Amino acid sequence: MRGILASCALTALLLAVAWADHHHHNHATAHSSEGEMSCHKVSSPNADFGFSLYKSLNAKTAAGKNIFYSPLGISTALSMLSTGARGETHSQLFSTLGYSAYDQAQVNEAYHHLFMMLGQSQQNQQLDVGNAVAVRSGFTPLDKFLKDVKHYYNGESFSVDFKKPDEAAAEINRFIAGKTQDKIKDMVKDLDPEMAMVLINYVFFRGQWVRPFDGNLTHKADFHVDESTTVQVDMMRRMGRYDFYEDSDNHTTVIMLPYQGNTSMMIVLPDEGKMAEVEGYINKDYIRHWHDKLFRNSVNLFLPKFSISAEASLDNTLKELGMTDAFGFNADFSGMSEEVSLRVSKVSHQAVLSVDETGTEAAATTTIEVMPMSMPDTMTLNRPFLVFIMEHSTRSILFMGKINNPTAM
């Protein structure tokens, strides 16, 4: 691929739906349409869900390993799944996502609006969020389910022959690779020949810094993964005006690095030895609090270049969060098929993030900033830090995670 990825982040999420060999009753669901919903309806529950995911993933992640995922991607895929769920299965999905105050029609409209807004957020950045359903050859899901997936969730469907699992996996992997600029290539490995459908969600983001780093200032430096592990990184350096906040009460320093377009990266650096404490309390209210407290300041910023990839199996995490029936033989997905009993067999997620000096292409623009005479603050990211990539028009957390080791791929 030409050019340098300045910050490219993407995820793919798979929901594998298998036959659930049992009989169930079809529950009729009342739908009320309240017209165009603002996508902001789901931004608050999605953020809460994102932090619930973080706490669960963090508890399962080995020390020194990176955590990185897309709360928006996972919420979108589960919301798409909920359009085919009924009864208790649907209630658990909505409860897990934090949507209990809404009905399916309101959530569908919120995502419809969200996709429209994200589609308009393309200036100077690339942000592709979409969904797909790989359907077993010879199996026909209900027309309404496929129409809803297409209309509300920017979703497409295609047919694969799960009886030839290797070929089916190759076809799904080609689809995901095509949607993620070949960054995620072999997501699907072991497909059950009995599979009925695989639901796919992808998020691809590539942004250019509003204020690029000068590659000539990048130098080798130590990064302290933990007390006993130090790795060498390419440390970028930039002196400039940034939105910055030192929160001494909460043992953190926060900086906002804007991309061109509607997107920014918020970096949260806990004080030395305080990561676990910060992880214990952090939630969307702290993100909002820091966002409101940021002020423009001169900062001497040291940020490592890195390119990381993180994978997670979400089955147990989602069960812990209350989504149990969907995986069991009492699952009710009669909104997908009235003839065949279905259950979710697997939910997996992969995300990639690359950060470097410039942008997608080396930009030949020069920006001149007027710096005040006061001494700048220094922020050196030479130990684990938290990262959030936020899209402002929809108030969405596109990606979040913890960079424990910038050299671990």
Image (cartoon, grey):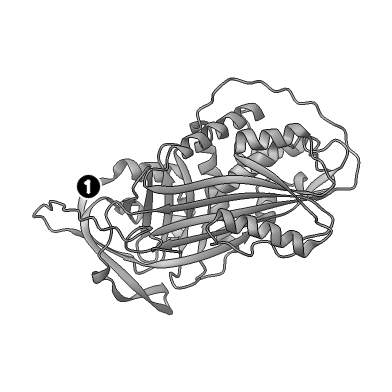
Disc 1: which residue: 296
Could you tell me if residue 15 is visible in this image?
yes
Which quadrant holds residue 149?
top right
Residue drawn at (29%, 58%) of the image: 363
Q: From the viewer's side, name the closer residue of 192 and 59.
A: 192
What percent of the width, then of the height, locates residue 218?
28, 71
What percent of the width, then of the height, locates residue 97?
61, 40
How many residues crowd around disc 1 within 10 Å: few (fewer than 14), some, or many (20 or more)? few
Residue drawn at (20%, 56%) of the image: 366
Q: From the viewer's side, name the closer residue of 308 and 159.
A: 159
Is 226 drawn above or below residue 32 in the view shown? below
Residue drawn at (67%, 33%) of the image: 148
Q: From the viewer's side, name the closer residue of 370 and 205.
A: 205
Disc count in the image? 1
Secondary structure category for the residue under label 1: strand
Task: Please indicate whether residue 295 sits to the left or right of residue 383 in the image.
Answer: left
Could you tell me if residue 91 is visible in this image?
no
Task: Please indicate whether residue 351 sits to the left or right of residue 123 in the image.
Answer: right
Task: Please indicate whether residue 103 sits to the left or right of residue 113 in the image.
Answer: right
What percent of the width, then of the height, locates residue 141?
79, 39
Residue drawn at (61%, 60%) of the image: 312
What percent of the width, then of the height, locates residue 207?
39, 53
